[in-house]
Amino acid sequence: MCGIIGYSGRSDATGRVIDGLYSLEYRGYDSAGIAAFVGGEVKTVKSEGRVARVCEMIKNFGGIKSNCAMGHTRWATHGAPSDVNSHPHICGKTVLVHNGIIENYAELAAELDAKADLLSQTDTEVAALTIDRSYFECGDPIKAIAEASKKLAGSYAFGIMFADLPGSIFGAKKDSPLIIGISDDGNFIASDITAVLKYTKKYIALSDGEMCRISADGYEIFDALGAPIKKEICTATWNAEAAERGGYDHFMYKEIAEEPTAIKKTLAPRVKGGAVAFADDGIDDIMLSEMKKLTVVACGTARHAGLIAKYYFERLCRVPVCVDIASEFRYRDPIIDADDTLMIISQSGETADSLAALRLARERGAKTVALVNVIGSTIAREADTVIYTHAGPEIAVASTKAYTVQAATLLAFALRTAYAKRTISFEELKRCTSVLTSELPKATESVIGRSAELYEAARKYFSADDIFYIGRGADGYIADEASLKLKEISYIHSEAYAAGELKHGTLSLITPKTPTVALATRRSLFEKMMSNIREIASRGGKVFAVCADDFPCGDAVEARFDLPACDEMIMPIVAATACQILAYHIAILRGCDVDKPRNLAKSVTVE
């Protein structure tokens, strides 16, 4: 959601900023712009639409030669997408780009008597004016930013230029991600390491309340009071090529194809003596054996991974699990205390609602565990312990490999917990570890290799206005994620139901024009699933089954996709990959932009 990139150095700043903006497109946006020091003055170019439009405008101006520039991709929150609402915003000597939401912008505008000074409908311009007034009063950029920040309620990552300080870019953050990128010929600020990977792997993650200044000669970091501080330099484990399509038509399909490797990379380092373990993550068997209740808090796809965790934990460990929607968690005054374990699941590690839930849990003394993909992210830093997945960069807005790896990691975590609680033996743990690390990647690869079969199914259903997904047990939770994936990228209205709920109202919506995708991987539930499928078929509904190869559906279904033979424990995760590919093909057939679906952002860093 929005993206910031800035560079000050001895090379072409405009080119580096444009490269960074293209790298940040996956976050979702509706307008873009840049600001650059040219001959001691600030020049801005911004427009509604794509980064390519800004590039075209720069070309028409004859180019912008600069060694210090910053850029922004905006996802509208306050004020519709438009040229005037695009960032950067200029107030007096202050040039500002912003990721986040200023919640008290209306009150600030009134306090500043700013009506005549504001050109846009954005909260960001009010923040720029607040900083500029402070800068006018004190003349010190860090002091001005610190004083202005005290007045701002909400979340922000700022990139700031002052017109009378050419060559310098300042940054500040609260509840939105911001890093410093360090290279041999200059320095960066950015929302995401992806934006600077082409030029450096070295970075520093800023914490809430911290500020920075970058220039061609170096960088400085300051605490909330403006005092200089030192921070550890991190090294990204990704390279620039990992964030490119690598010959695939779309990032989404590339990332699905990477699932087998991502599963191996995540699980292999955690196998000790033939059994999965989490001691290296700071989670030993004593901690697991003492777990009495697990609360999982997440949003969207990550929450659906949490539902899979609920299924596995309760079945294997006999531990009660509550799965909460992060955006609702703290507003219902949850019952949680020092005896509870709370797990936050987030691909980016920056999800605003999930971060707020984490902080509330820590306030109440609960043990907190983070499951994230981005090293050094805010959620990772603030949790008591962190389990990193190693999915690599996920550029497509719709999550695929991150979900699959999360599900596999959560199953591994449940297995180790079950052993710690002695609800399974060590021999069973070793057997299941082999299934996870060997069978799961192979089965997933097999499904990906049969993409053409799922394309043929997509041809049957891509013109539907509505599609239902049903399943029982773990399959019901997979149905939730499969339905979301279809909605995200194809814009088809879709709903997921526990199959047994059909007769409690949903059957009234079944028509010959409303297909149903039935997931059936649990042999103990085959008979019940067949009953539900027949209920649909008898009312003229068309059913596509994603199922175990021995599912006895006969002619009750219009078509089926048989999953590869594998242990039933992992088959729901394999089914999820099949549903991702089905949604991908349906969206392509409908002419949709699968990597950048409308109205959506990759990392939701505002509430």
Image (cartoon, helix red, strand yellow):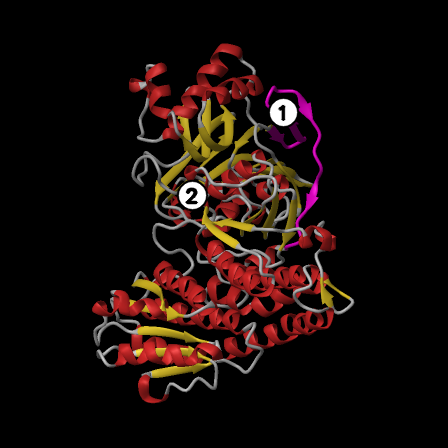
Q: In this view, does 301 lie to the left or right of 179?
A: left
Q: Residue at x 42, y 46 (%)?
A: 55
Residue 223 is tagged as: 1
Residue 327 is tagged as: 2
Q: Do the residues labelled 1 and 2 touch (CB within 8 Å)?
A: no
**Residue 60 horizontal/vertical position (percent):** 38, 43
**Residue 174 horizontal/vertical position (percent):** 52, 31
**Gap in Å between the C-alphas at discs 1 and 2?**
29 Å
**Front-lying residue, 571 or 264:** 571
**Front-lying residue, 125 or 374:** 374
Q: Which residue is drawn at 56% across and 15% down?
A: 140
| Element marked by disc 1 | loop
**Quadrant position of residue 606:** top left
Quadrant placement of the N terminus: top left
**Front-lying residue, 125 or 314:** 314
Q: In this view, does 192 lie to the left or right of 330?
A: right
Where 14 sits versus 466, above or below? above
Where 96 sits versus 568, above or below? above
Residue extent of the magenta highlight: 212-238
Quadrant placement of the C terminus: top left
| Residue type at tag 2 | Ser
